[in-house]
Amino acid sequence: MLKIDCFGDICPIPILKIQKQLKLTNYGDKFMIITDHSCVMESIFDTFNGSNLKIDSNEVMNGVWEITIKRIK
């Protein structure tokens, strides 16, 4: 799975990285965003709410999130 490093990136940079990757992503494909800012996680859910994406987040350690994005139909 492709992992996109967003450590230290503040919005809107992670959103722009996701939009760029989505242009290359087919149905069923997934990728992961790794971030150290909780506002990035919130922005992802707000920006892509209602889209054809399945978004799961997991705080793997204090202050670090792995957000998996899967394109669905």
Image (tube, helix red, strand yellow):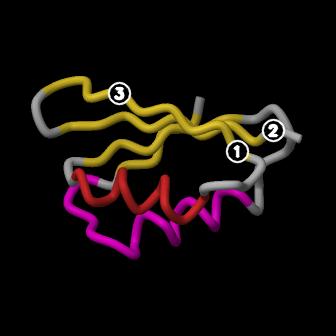
Q: Tell me if label 1 and label 3 are in contact, CB under 8 Å.
A: no
In the displayed structure, would residue 22 be above or below residue 10? Answer: above
- Which secondary structure, mark 1? strand
What residue is drawn where x is 85% and y is 45%? 26
Task: Tell me where residue 9 appears, x and y as whole percent.
Answer: 27, 65
Disc 2: which residue: 72
Residue 53 badge: 1
What residue is drawn where x is 64% and y is 66%? 20
The residue carrying pointer 3 sits among few (fewer than 14), some (14 to 19) or many (20 or more) residues within 10 Å by Cα, namely few
Q: Tell me if label 2 and label 1 are in contact, CB under 8 Å.
A: yes
The residue carrying pointer 2 sits among few (fewer than 14), some (14 to 19) or many (20 or more) residues within 10 Å by Cα, namely few
Q: Earlier in the sequence, mark 3 or mark 2?
A: 3
Task: Tell me where residue 27 appears, x and y as whole percent.
Answer: 86, 40
Give amino acid for label 1.
Leu
Disc 3: which residue: 58
60 vs 23, left or right, is: left
Q: Earlier in the sequence, mark 1 or mark 3?
A: 1
Task: Tell me where residue 28 appears, x and y as whole percent.
Answer: 81, 32
What residue is drawn where x is 16% and y is 25%? 61
Q: Give the quadrant of residue 23.
A: bottom right
What residue is drawn where x is 41% and y is 33%? 57
Residue 20 badge: none
Q: Magenta includes 18? A: yes
Q: Earlier in the sequence, mark 2 or mark 1?
A: 1
Residue segment shown in magenta: 7-22
